[in-house]
């Protein structure tokens, strides 16, 4: 079963071994094999649980076995990817619309919007609505 990453991800390192880490620590040695490794967009992930990355919105199925196991149609896969994007940026549910339309791309430390590519357009619309009253 395999999937293909649609966003960068930190995944389990197949070279990491718990037993080796335990032995190294018992002998006072450092175990230098990282438990997780960063993988870029497009990386193919193989394994019996790769379908979970599809369900989480991190990947798309790369074979029929994964497609069947994740049990999602393309619209559901796209919705999961959109939800993952929002969650990864820490977007509050009240701000989903503003994020989706490009008014904001995240938050400044004080909680104010970090302006998105369409920020000016929506700010102008709000001021125009105020003038009509």
Image: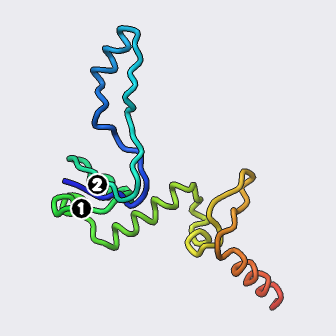
Query: Can you tell which quarter of the image residue 58 is in?
Result: bottom left
- Relative image position of residue 72 (x, y in whole percent): 27, 66
Neighbor class of circle 1 (other Cα within 10 Å; few <14, some 14-19, many 20+) is some
Above or below for 18 versus 64: above
Query: Can you tell which quarter of the image residue 5 is in?
Result: bottom left
Query: Can you tell which quarter of the image residue 8 is in?
Result: bottom left
Q: With 70 as the anchor, is 105 left or right in this view?
A: right
Neighbor class of circle 2 (other Cα within 10 Å; few <14, some 14-19, many 20+) is some
Looking at the figure, which quarter contains the C terminus?
Answer: bottom right
Residue at 37% over, 28% down: 33
In the image, which disc is placed on residue 62?
Answer: 1
Q: Which residue is mark 2?
A: 44
Q: How is the image coloured?
A: rainbow
Residue at 57% over, 54% down: 90
Above or below for 73 versus 107: below
- Mark 2 / mark 1, whichever is N-terminal: 2
């Amino acid at each position: 079963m395999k999937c293909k990453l649609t966003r960068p991800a930190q995944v389990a390192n197949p070279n990491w071994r718990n037993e080796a880490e335990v032995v190294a620590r018992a002998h006072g040695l450092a175990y230098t094999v990282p438990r997780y490794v960063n993988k870029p967009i497009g990386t193919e992930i193989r394994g019996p649980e790769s379908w979970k990355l599809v369900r989480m919105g991190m990947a798309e199925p790369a074979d029929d076995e994964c497609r069947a196991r994740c049990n999602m149609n393309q619209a559901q896969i796209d919705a999961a990817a959109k939800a993952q994007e929002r969650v990864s940026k820490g977007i509050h549910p009240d701000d989903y619309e503003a994020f989706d339309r490009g008014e904001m791309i995240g938050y400044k430390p004080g909680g104010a919007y970090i302006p998105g590519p369409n920020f000016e357009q929506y700010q102008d619309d709000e001021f125009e609505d105020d003038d009509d009253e």
